[in-house]
Image: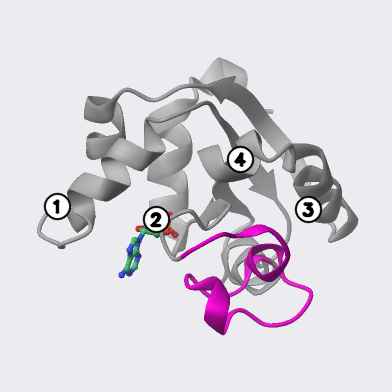
Amino acid sequence: MAGKRTFTMIKPDAMEAGNAGAIIKMIQEAGFKISAMKMTKLSEETAGQFYAVHKERPFYKDLTTYMSSGPIIAMILEKDNAVEDFRKLIGATNPADAAEGTIRKLFAKSIEANAVHGSDADDTALNEGNFFFAKTEQF
Ligand code: CMP
């Protein structure tokens, strides 16, 4: 059975552009409940830990530099079929490939500065949520 939770970050490009409010509104209007939320700034080291799965990829260093370049908003989101439905709402990783009306099509600047992160599976959603939030911060 598909899980009820996913994890997202509003990335530095979308924060800097002042698009956080519009993105959160789209998320809520799509039926997601916000179970946890915080604004924070990652260090390069913490960004590296979060994206450790991409350690061997050529874009890893740029990604961790970019993700620690400004504040982000982290959220745990709840909805039936959360991971898949959220990935549909945000669109493809590369905004050039993202469907019309998706968050990345509307707000992303590039494949790296792509406005939002979305978990790719139920187990990663759990791990990523727990990476940012103590149990007492998850509602
Ligand atoms: P995200 O969904 O957060 O997961 C990994 C991130 O790496 C991705 O979004 C992009 O921000 C970034 N990235 C940069 N270059 C690439 C690439 N060529 N392929 C996939 N992800 C990339």
Tell which residue pokes out farthest to the top in this image.
136
The kind of residue tagged 2 is Asp
The image quadrant of residue 35 is: top right
| Label 1: which secondary element | loop
Spatial separation of the CA atoms under disc 2 and disc 1: 19 Å
Residue at 84% across, 61% down: 30
Frontmost of labels 4 and 2 is: 4
50, above or below 32, in the image: above
Assign ligand 1 to one image quadrant.
bottom left
Q: Mark 4 sits on what residue?
A: 76
The kind of residue tagged 1 is Lys
Spatial separation of the CA atoms under disc 4 and disc 1: 24 Å
133, above or below 110, in the image: above
The kind of residue tagged 4 is Ile
CB of mark 2 within 8 Å of CB of mark 1? no
Residue at 90% across, 56% down: 29
Spatial separation of the CA atoms under disc 4 and disc 2: 13 Å
Tell whether circle 4 marks a residue whose Cβ is less than 8 angstroms from ligand 1. no
In the rendered view, does 75 fall on the left or right side of 89? left
Image quadrant containing the C terminus: top right
Frontmost of labels 4 and 1 is: 1
**Span of residues in magenta:** 90-110
Q: Position of residue 2 (x, y in %)?
A: 57, 69
Which mark is first along the chain, 3 or 1?
3
Q: Mark 1 sits on what residue?
A: 55
| Label 2: which secondary element | helix
CB of mark 4 within 8 Å of CB of mark 2? no
Q: Mark 3 sits on what residue?
A: 27
Q: Position of residue 134 (x, y in %)?
A: 48, 20
Q: Mark 2 sits on what residue?
A: 123
Which mark is first along the chain, 4 or 3?
3
